[in-house]
Image: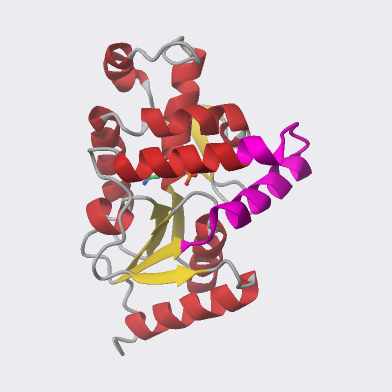
Amino acid sequence: MHKITIAIDGYSSTGKSTVAKQLADSLGYVYVDSGAMYRAVTLYAMQNGIISKKHFDTEKLKESLSSIHLKFKKEAGWNKAHIFLNGTDVENEIRNLEVSEFVSPIATVPEVRTKLVAQQQQMGQEKGVVMDGRDIGTVVFPNAELKIFMNASAPERAQRRYKELLERGDVVTFDEILKNIKERDHIDTTREDSPLRKAADAIEIDNSEMNLEDQFHVVLQLAKDRIAGRV
Ligand code: DC
């Protein structure tokens, strides 16, 4: 069957990755979590003295880019591909609050974006891909056949993220999560290079009041219609 490209953008913690993964599994498509790539670059920067609470050495980050190698790999028994940073599986580490606090400034650097966008475009060359992020429908795949833009209220998103981190065993408070979400929204929407925007041809879904199942069915139907060329 004819394959399409599906771009899912939206604010932090709107459940983009959950629906993108469900959709990819159901269609037999490849799922790519582009945020994981920005998070892995952030982890590298933290580990190499490039970013901390007190400083951010953008020049050193730019010089280091050629030493940062990212790869997604999936092994039997894993429910999704993990991201590897220079050969090490960092899938778990990149989800902590510290990485979340530094990732938005890292993602403002145009040289970082150029490198990651090129790799993302390569991964989507064959179509049959569902990619989630902030600039997928606007920059990475402006010709994607289906673009979804996800939104939900900030407190609702913070509540979901808070629950997720507590379940992982992280020690966090609801207030710090809400603050982080609001800060990331601000940086992601106001940065100069590829700010988070709804593409003109994206379909917006506000899932504040929707459960995962209903949301999945809405998105799956949209995808099936596009694949069949009905809309
Ligand atoms: O999807 P996420 O929350 O894991 O993404 C982490 C950060 O990475 C997000 O705050 C902004 C940045 N990002 C981006 O700038 N462009 C993307 N395509 C994906 C993520």
Q: What is the total number of numbered labels drawn onto the structure image?
A: 0
Please identify the residue farthest to the bottom as the structure is shown: 230
Whether residue 168 is in magenta: the answer is yes
Quick check: 81 left or right of 175? left
Expressed as whole percent of the image width and height from the top left, the position of residue 170 reads: 74, 33
Q: Position of residue 146 (x, y in %)?
A: 33, 71
Using the image, determine if residue 25 lies above or below residue 106.
below
Colouring method of the image: secondary structure
Q: Nearer the viewer, residue 203 or 221?
A: 203
* Residue 222, horizontal then vertical, whole percent: 41, 80
- 187 up-or-down from 49: above or below: below
Picture quadrant of ligand 1: top left
Image quadrant occupied by the C terminus: bottom left
Q: Quadrant of the N terminus?
A: bottom left
What residue is at 47 percent from the left and 75 percent from the top?
219
Q: Position of residue 155 (x, y in %)?
A: 61, 53
Residue 133 in view in this figure: yes
Which residue is rendered at x = 25% and y = 71% of the image? Answer: 201
| Residue 120 sits above or below residue 37 on the image | below
- The answer to whether residue 166 is magenta is yes
Residue found 50% across the figure and 15% down from its top: 53
Quarter-wise, where is residue 228 in the image? bottom left
Residues 157 and 33: in front is: 157
Indicate whether 205 appears above or below 40: below
Closer to the camera in the image, 84 or 218:
218
Nearer-the-camera pick, 85 or 143: 143
Quadrant of the image occupied by residue 66: top left
Q: Is residue 34 left or right of residue 117?
A: right
Give the dominant element type of the magenta stretch: helix, strand or loop.
helix
- Magenta residues span 151-177
Q: Is residue 78 visible?
A: no
